Image (spheres, rainbow, N blue to C red):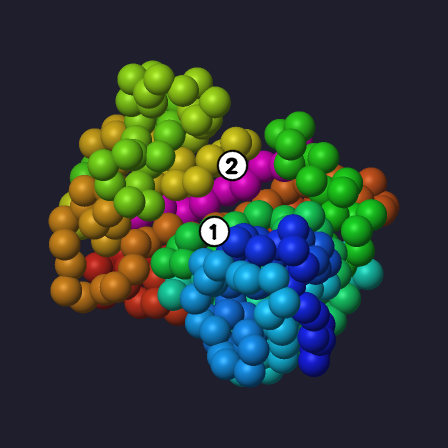
Amino acid sequence: MISNVTFVVENEEAGKRLDMVLTARFPSSSRSFCKEAVLHGAISINGKVCRNKGEKLAAGQTVVIEQLLEAADNRVQPDPSVWASILFEDDSLVAVNKPAGMPVQPLRHDETGTLMNGLVNRYPELAGVGDQPLMAGALHRIDTETSGLVMAARTQEVFNEMRRQFQERLVTKVYLALVEGHVALPGTLQGELAHDPTVPYCRMMDAAKLDHPDRRMFAETSYRPVEWIGGWTLLEVTIRTGVTHQIRCQLAGNGTPIVGDALYGARPRLDTSRHFLHAFSVSFEHPKTKCPCRIEAPLTGDFVRFLEEAGGATA
C-alpha cells in the first residue's frame, strides 16, 4: 500500500485527469484503486480533499496521497465467520460443500462473507494462488444460489495442473437438479450459449443470432432421471464444459427449468429463495499422485427438507 506520499504536478501533467496522473505515476496500483482512493477522500490537492477522479490538474499543484492500494493488496481477506463443510483436504487440494446463498468469491478486495473469505481464513496460502486474485485458488465457480462442491488448489503448481485438466475437459462434474415436469428418458443437450443482451446476468441459447462469434461458447449437458417427485423430476446432470449457467439455461430451453429458477422461466415460489441445483461430485486425476479421484458433496439440508416435504427420497 502506498501511504503518505506527496508530489507536485509537472508541466506535462497539466490538464490531465487526476486518476490518469495517479495511474501513470504509480503503476503498481490500478485505475480502479486510484478511483477508489479518490472517492474515499484519500487524495488531497493543495490541502483540500478531492473526490472527483476526473479533476483536471494544473502545474505546480501539490497532491497528497493518504492511502492508495497496490495490486499486491488486491487479495481475499480472511473471514473467520464464514463456515462450510470440508469434504476433502490434503497438501494439494481442498474441497468444500458450499451452502446455497453464499457467493464463491468476493467482487472487491474489502468484501467479506464469501466462501473464499472463509477458506483463506483457514488456509492462508490460498490468497496467493491462481490467476485471479479474488478467486484465491478456487478452481471453478458455482452460482450463489447453487449449493455443493467447490475445489481450490493450495499451491500454484497444483492450480496450473488442475486448470490444464479443466481446459482439456478431463474433469467430470456431476450435479443434481430438481426440474419441473416428468423426464422419462436420459438425453444430451448441445449448443452455443451467450449473454442475453436483453436480460442482465442471463444466458441465451440461440447464440447463433449474435454477430460476434467470440461471444459464443459451446456447452454440452447430459442428464438422466433419478426419481419422479410429484410433478417434478430429480435429474443427475453431467457436464464437461464449464459455461456459466449452462445447466440452468439448457434445461430451461428443453422445457424443464430447475425448480425455483425464476430467471430461466420456472414458476415463482413462495416457499424457497433458491433454485434447486446442487454440485454433487467431481472426478479428476490427482495432480500429485496421478491416481483417479472422485469427491462427492451430500445434498445440503435445505435441499433434503424440500424433497422430504414434497414426498420424495433424498437421493
Q: Is residue 141 found left or right of 26 in the rendered image? A: left
Which residue corresponds to the image point at 51% horizontal and 70% vertical from the top-left? 38
Residue 203 is situated, as x and y percent measured from the top left of the image, at 33, 36
Is residue 131 one of those drawn in magenta?
no
Q: Please state the extent of the stretch shown in magenta in the rendering.
A: 170-180
- Looking at the image, is 112 positioned above or below residue 283? below
| Residue 9: quadrant of the picture | bottom right
Residue type at tag 2: Gly
State the count of labels.
Answer: 2
Query: Is the magenta region chiefly helix, strand or loop?
Result: strand
Residue 45 is situated, as x and y percent measured from the top left of the image, at 55, 74
Neighbours of disc 2 within 10 Å: few (<14), some (14-19), many (20+): many
The residue closer to the viewer here, 277 or 128, is 128
**Which residue is disc 2 drawn over?**
242
The residue closer to the viewer here, 18 or 86, is 18
The residue closer to the viewer here, 49 or 202, is 49
**Residue 212 showing in the rendered view:** yes
Mark 1: which secondary structure? loop
Residue type at tag 1: Ile
Residue 195 is situated, as x and y percent measured from the top left of the image, at 35, 34
| Residue 116: quadrant of the picture | bottom right
Quadrant placement of the N terminus: bottom right
Mark 2: which secondary structure? loop
Which residue corresponds to the image point at 41% horizontal and 47% vertical from the top-left? 176
Is residue 178 one of those drawn in magenta?
yes
State the residue lying farthest toward the right: 289
The residue closer to the viewer here, 41 or 87, is 41
**Residue 234 showing in the rendered view:** no
Which residue corresponds to the image point at 14% horizontal and 49% vertical from the top-left? 267
**Which residue is disc 1 drawn over?**
142
Neighbours of disc 1 within 10 Å: few (<14), some (14-19), many (20+): many
